[in-house]
Amino acid sequence: MATETAPRWRSTLDSVVVYAQGAVCRRLVRGSVPPHGRVRVTGLPRSLDPGSLRARVLGAPGVRVTEARVEVEAEPLGTRAPDGLRSEVERLREEYAAAQGRRDRQLGLIDEVRALHPVPPARRREDPHRRTPVDAWLELADFVDERLTGLHTRLVELEEALRGVEHELTVAADRLARASTDAPSAHVETTVCAVLTLDGAGDAELELELEYGVPGAVWVPAYRLTHRQGDGTGRLVMRASVAQRTGEDWTGVRIALATADLRRRTDLPKLRSIRIGRRQPAPAPTGWREPPAGLADLFAGYEAAGPRPAPIAAPAPVGAGPAPVAGAAGAASGPVPPPPPPPAPQGYGGPPPAPAPPAAPGSAYAPSPALFGGGPAALAQSAPARPAGRSRTGGGSFAGAPAPMAPAAPGAAAPPQPPPPPPAAGPPQPSGAELDYAALVLCGPDEHGGRKGRLFPEPPLGAAAAEHRRRAEAVAALPLPGHAVRPRESAGSFDHRFDAAARADIPSDGTWHTVTVAALPVAVRTEYLCVPSVEQTVYAELVLSNATDQALLAGPVEVTVDDDFLLTTALPTLAPGGVRRVGLGPAEGIRVVRRTNLHESTSGLRNNTTVLDHRVHVELANRLAKPVTVEVRERVPVTSDPDVRIVERAGWTAPDDGVGPEHHAPGTRVRRVDLPAGATAALDGGYEIRFPAGKALVGGNRRS
């Protein structure tokens, strides 16, 4: 059954799951199934991965999809004009080239006029001295100055016009680069279809679901935090910046965001057992079959008819050298045997094929090594894509027209051929592409290198699909917004999925678009922290507690306090049930001053102990209209020498590492002070260092 008779069903994009890089799209389609059970679903993007196509029937338990295959159709647009942006860019490019040409011609005229200068006639030795015609020199100088003034005035106008056209061209080119890639190219419209074969459908109307993966989609999280002073809860709105260049616009689709890697393998490894004894399990079938008998005589009649007539040679371009004539060279030096083709890949079954028979005597044509040699990679690149609707059993799918070859130069040595690789032990192991029986193509009589009459995998979708995928994957290099972090970097060892609350529109333009995901309640409290020994400034912090079952990834967060925007800062990764701190910057309403005093003395029975008494005095002043709690941090020395003792003053305690993954340096001491509105407080602290009088402190300023 030819695929042209299959009805065309238009599909609708329903939902998209965007992963760390790439996306999985889900389309819905409804229609009546013909008696032969084959339908063609249109509307698929040009960058989809053909191996990721999945299809299933919804709401019909007895109907199943037995085959799903991707096919590409291309047709010229004809007389239809291209889109406006592309035509505008082409028009501006032509206008820019014309303006640049006018400017260059004006520069040439200026150079010609500037080169005008008086040249005196040649003077012979016997000629007397002549007087210089000063008036003529001055007239020429006035003419050059006047002419250059007019030319430079015109040059300024031309350069201004050139800058204007260049600006318009830059703006139009930027708009074209940011435009959606869903529109077809200027001259060719490519349609990607999914050919489905249904079993047990009858003539009923069914609903199908198509799922496929596409590259060229990335996302990063972003947040907006709103809370009021004095309130212990806040509202955290999770948003996502999504950029995609998949080749199709996502209009009115359900968006889901996942932190997983779409390209990571999830299948479990197969552990094969090793048995000791004579009885071993039967080997798994490989799918390899012996070639049918008489395969070599299948095209005997075709070969007995002789070679094809020679094609008419194209006229040589003007100015080219004389092309060598194959017939004349052959008549002068005798028939030239064609070079032996390289060993072709083994076909679907059978021993390595025998070399192709030589061409008939006097023939000036031989198979081109670029088309019929070099293994399956060279064949896949040189063979044209099979047009849609062509029968899979037709011959010559990999073959092309024989290319003329000029005779080898006299005395030229043929390049040495590499020895063929040794055959592998046991039967051949077909690859996954060779086991896809529906995609195998029977090679026709024009094939060489032992390919004729054998089945080979169908060539890939072509270079156009690879180019679309390359352009789509370029979106991964898009610059990130401020404070943004890739999901795979912030997610760590867990994967999570976030479902957007409403449908969204994301065009395929390769720029960032914001999508609101969900609103989450979080516990919020404001704390103030200062380290006066480092900087006499008080900083405000927000302590966030995630009481939900969803993880919060690292990303930028916009903080709004009492309906006033405060700042944009970085939110760290917050696991379910986790607590983290977010810095809000300096608190200008709270002042801190630190003073230190060092007193050195001796003690002991014979004054054999040196005592360094460090005293610290900290003053705090709250100028805010609300009470605050300030945490003051100091640090005392830490020693491992048993002769040195550190005696601390009371009132300072070691910090608690229970809030977030914060780690304090050894010797850190904290003190929390409650300050009412407009109140002040003074803190005294310090420590004594006692060590033997015969020793001294080494390193640093002990009086700091």
Image: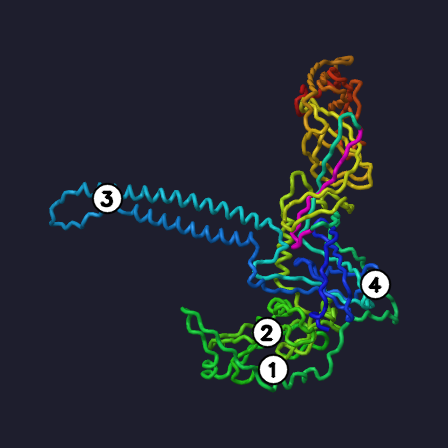
Which structural element holds mark 4? Answer: loop
Q: Which mark is residue 140?
A: 3
Name the residue at 79% across, 67% down.
198
State the image coordinates of residue 453 (x, y, percent, origin top left): 68, 78
For the residues labelled 3 and 1, say whether their Cβ atoms are less than 8 Å apart.
Answer: no
For the residues labelled 4 and 1, say whether their Cβ atoms are less than 8 Å apart.
Answer: no
Disc 1: which residue: 357
Q: Is residue 410 above or below residue 543?
A: below
Q: Nearer the viewer, residue 589 or 125?
A: 589
Q: Closer to the N terminus: mark 2 or mark 1?
A: 1
Residue kind at label 3, given as amino acid type: Leu
Q: Nearer the viewer, residue 105 or 313?
A: 105
Which structural element holds mark 2? Answer: loop
Image quarter of the N terminus: bottom right
Q: Which mark is residue 400?
A: 2
Q: Which mark is residue 63?
A: none
Q: Closer to the N terminus: mark 2 or mark 4?
A: 4
Q: Is residue 254 above or below residue 570?
A: below
Residue kind at label 4, given as amino acid type: Arg
Q: Which mark is residue 272?
A: 4
